[in-house]
Amino acid sequence: MRTIYLTCLIYLFLSAVSCVNKHEVTVDVLVIGGSVSGISSGIQAARMGVNTLVVEESEWLGGMLTAAGVSAVGGNYQLPAGIWGEFRSQLALHYGGLDSLKTGWVSNVLFEPSVGNEIFHRMVETESHLQVWKGFTLCDIKKTPAGWCAEVVSEQEGIKTIYTKVLIDATELGDVAKRCGVKYDIGMESRHQTQEDIAPEKENNILQDLTYVAVLKDYGKDVTIPQPANYNPAEFACSCANSRCVSPKEPGRVWSKEKLITYGKLPNNKYMINWPIEGNDFYANIIELSETERKAVLEQAKQRTLRFLYFIQKELGFNTLSLADDEFPTADKLPLIPYHRESRRIHGLVRFTLNHMTHPFDQVQKLYRTSVAVGDYPVDHHHTRYQCYEDLPNLYFYPVPSFGLPLGTLIPKDVDDLIVAEKSISVSNIANGATRLQPVVLQIGQAAGALAALAVVENKPISQVGVRQVQQVILDAKGYLLPYLDVPVDDVCFQSYQRIGSTGILKGEGRNVDWSNQTWLRVNDVLLTSELQGLEEIYPYVQFPAESKTISLKEAIHVLKLIVAMEGMSDVNVDKKITDVWEAFNLGDMILTQPILRGQMAVLLDQIVDPFHRKAVDLEGFFIE
């Protein structure tokens, strides 16, 4: 790695940092980082017919899901959106069904990191418009009138120059965004900055703990490693219930050693050790450090993981478990990269906060109308390795309903032709505790790829690409805009429910059920006039009585005819269209006097009036006149 950086520096000196090189390529979309979001953005952009290049430093693809070893997926089991759903299906195919992925108790989807890497490689190989360059490091990046010029280097192929129209930052820590001049935040905002009640009184630069994961394998014999330097069993005494545990930091989570080991149990007698309870989490803020300084700090994180492994072997008796020799292509058998739970968070065209999650319909900005990804994981922050963690907000599984993530969080302010993905999007520190999860980040990447491809195809600035265009691409790729659980993605009504929900005409209901965060459109409930305030907002001439009452199918048809007439849709024969839609969407018995259901009204509005496509919204969710 040192050779790469020296080569890069020498080249930049000799060329006077000019973007001139005999090894030049031109692509439509350049993705820096073969991370979770990097791979999904590359795949999506390529599927839309634009020439796309992903540049990755290592030989692995998939970032935190594979190279970092975090192969226990957090959330979205009931929301198999887009490329996340495709990846999960490939895992199920490999292991023999979805139930075969439920090997540990922390997740419903667990797998060997090497298998995930293989699947991502197969996925990118099927895309004819996608190239992936592995083993390349970014040297330099410059803005050009037509986009960007990047210099990348590898030990084998030297330095290459890449010209691109659209650049996507899919790095783990948002390093490209910084180099492009994007403003960003690190650490926790104050409650006065974000209006989040549980945010700290004062801002700080404290990040979540990072982790060097260990993937263990059962060798069936004693494979205890040599005692690591500075080992002290007291360091991990309360990682689980044992005789050494006297004063646990988290008294409510002193679980058995069996629960520790099976937390991340993987297929084929392997175990992912990513244990937050006085285990191998490690506090460090390395974001603004140099590469050399980062490496030194991360070596300390590795050593903590090795000490914890020795504790597991020596003190807990799991001496047949040790680092798997068939997972990572590293000399120490640890993952290629650490698991970063947090990175820079850009200043985007919008910022998504906890308030947008918990009360999406009550905010001034209607960001839910612009959603391009969904999540159902609670706000989960890891801070116990920070020295004064007791002074921080308690963000352990803070309950939120499932949520939609807005498109504007991917678009930085004041820097053109750049999209930011991974965990560096424009969210608050607290919201990051839920948006950082792998399925959400896969969707962030897919949305970034869709946005980039549309900008290229339409020759528009990124910020001027229509929100509804991006959302329709997501829907066509079997993605979710809002996390409604009423029907699966392959149901004939799925897109109609998603589109009408995204207009705000019908609003979903968020629920917390144990650890499950849900949202339902309640499509089988009878529709009440009080639930159609969103319809009046779009079509103010549609008025309902003050008292809440049911609406018959006949009354609903009258409303549809009024909208069609007032909107000048003279080519629409409402009576015939309703009959055709009712039959095509299997909406049940067509009885004019019966109250109409919410789902039935959603389909009729979508298919006959089509407010989703006819009423454009901006990135803040306001309707464009």
Image: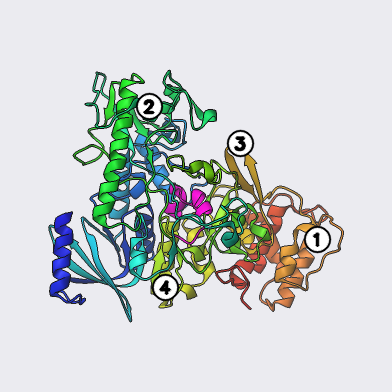
> Residue placed at 84% from the left, 56% from the top?
548
Q: Position of residue 430 (x, y in %)?
A: 53, 52
Q: Which residue is mark 4?
A: 455
Q: Earlier in the sequence, mark 2 or mark 3?
A: 2
The colour scheme of the drawn protein is: rainbow
Query: Gap in Å between the C-alphas at discs 3 and 4?
Result: 42 Å
Query: Gap in Å between the C-alphas at discs 4 and 2?
Result: 56 Å
**Element class at badge 2:** helix
Q: Is residue 583 magenta?
A: no
Q: Position of residue 572 (x, y in %)?
A: 67, 72
Note whether residue 78 is visible.
Answer: no
Which residues, given as a range, are shown in magenta?
A: 425-443
Q: Earlier in the sequence, mark 2 or mark 1?
A: 2
**Element class at badge 4:** helix
Q: Taken as a whole, is the magenta stretch helix, strand or loop?
A: helix
Q: Which residue is mark 1?
A: 554
Q: Position of residue 225 (x, y in %)?
A: 23, 26
Query: Gap in Å between the C-alphas at discs 2 and 1?
Result: 73 Å
Q: Which label sits in the foreground, 1 or 3?
A: 3
Q: Which label sits in the foreground, 2 or 3?
A: 2
Query: Gap in Å between the C-alphas at discs 4 and 1?
Result: 43 Å
Count neighbours of disc 2 (C-alpha within 10 A) and say few if under 14, some if 14 to 19, many if 20 or more: few
Indicate the amino acid at tag 4. Ala
Q: Earlier in the sequence, mark 3 or mark 4?
A: 4
**Element class at badge 3:** loop
